[in-house]
Image: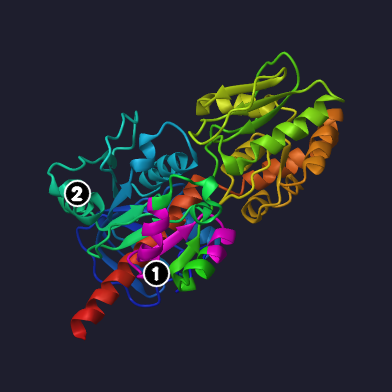
Amino acid sequence: MCFPEQIPTVQQPLPQIAGRELNLKIAGVFLGDLVQPVKYRLQGFEIAGARDLRLKEFEFFQWSQRRGPPTSVILHYPVTIALDATPLTVPTGGVRRYTWELANALAREFREDRYWLISDQPIPDLGEMPANLRRGQGPTTRLERKWWLSGVQREMSRRGCDVFHGTDFSVPYLRRYPSVMTLHDLSPWKPERWQPDAARVRRRTPFLLRFAIATLVITPSEAVRREAIQRFRLDPSCVVAIPLAASASFRPVRGRQWDRPYLLFVGTLEPRKNIARLIEAWRAVRKKHEVDLILAGRVRSDFKPPAPEQGLYLVGAVPEQDLAAWYCGAVACVYPSLYEGFGLPVLEAMQCGSVVITSRDAAIMEVAGGAAIHVDAEDTKALAAAMTEVAADKSKFDGLRERALARAGEFTWTRTAQRTREVYRVARERFNARAQSSRSA
């Protein structure tokens, strides 16, 4: 089964529906909740016992007159989804941001659904959330502390969940519910020094994939999708690439004030981010231009911080609400990563209208879409040359910044949520079809 950009067309008469709150999509346009008893006939499709059709932006008949008669009707039944909230127990990081932004976008876009954030770890206070997004209880007994074997299933049963979404490389070990796994990248199977603490993922995830414990798999880029299919010998129809997005807080704003011009790196400080080579290249730039280098991000335990030197600053993890000003104030944002599954800081910087210098990693190039400066991640001279050129005359790159803003506008969390919600629907269909086939055998 393919995963089209648009929600597929229903090709058969709709069932009679009464007393249900549903989402109706006509030709891919959201029409709202059905709340008053009326009867509609749309291109041979009949909906009976519904109660008033309200539109999100304009009245249905105005829409019909402007666009012509609808050509497809889609009904979305409400579902309850459990999302692995373990990434939310750490203060920063790309997987944390993915989990948080996706959960909120799903809850806002599909208000008739319910979403539960569950984990065997204590989930911190997450502040204000949509009414249909809630925190679960976690394990309450010794048996439930065997989380992936038993605890997840019991928590899903308590909450009446239909599908589990493993937001970070894992799903429950037993196939009692449909499950979707997000495979962010294949870094655990790259040089071990990149992920020394990922031994459990290296052992567990291939088993969950090869034995189809996960009903469907999401990757953040086509590059990772191709890589995953090849490495784990997956059925291509079971793996779909759904890109991430930058938060709406990333936009052109007044740049942060700093004593001197600065180059900026944002991301977790870890071996595959290529920080040592970045510092070496910056030293070459500094011989010609008085420009500082600022490293912003959480320092992972296996990262050896550089020795202090003039012009080099490690500022730690920067709160999201402050990052846009850092991006906008930089001469350029430099992200020479050796390997990425998506490269969210690249998109964040582009959405702020910053000049981005980054590597030729396949996923990053896919995301940047020609709106960034790419160099070989292992070529220190090329990296230094790119930074020197931008530091010499930033205005030369105004066109690149405009392309970056346009490219970043193609990514939204709403779109990510819509495509993810469609994956949940397909996962349920496949799981139920498999279960029915097993019973019939």
Mark number for residue 418?
none
Residue picked out by circle 2: 155
- Using the rendered image of the protein, determine whether residue 333 is visible from the camera's viewpoint: no
Q: Is residue 245 magenta?
A: no
Residue 409: x and y, percent?
Answer: 62, 45
Q: Residue at x 41, y 73 (%)?
A: 43
Residue picked out by circle 1: 210
Count of marks, rendered view: 2
Q: Which secondary structure class fits the magenta region best?
A: helix
In the foreground, 404 or 287: 287
- Using the rendered image of the protein, determine whether residue 156 is visible from the camera's viewpoint: yes
Residue 387: x and y, percent?
Answer: 79, 35
In the foreground, 205 or 79: 205
Q: Residue at x 40, y 72 (%)?
A: 10
Amino acid on which the number 1 mark rests in the picture: Arg
Looking at the image, which residue sits at the far top?
259
Residue 373: x and y, percent?
Answer: 76, 44
Colour theme: rainbow
How far is the residue under mark 2 from the one under mark 1? Answer: 26 Å
- How packed is label 1: few (under 14 Cα within 10 Å), some, or many (20 or more)? few
Residue 79: x and y, percent?
Answer: 28, 56
Q: Which residues are magenta?
A: 200-227
- Ranked by sequence position, the earlier of labels 2 and 1 is 2
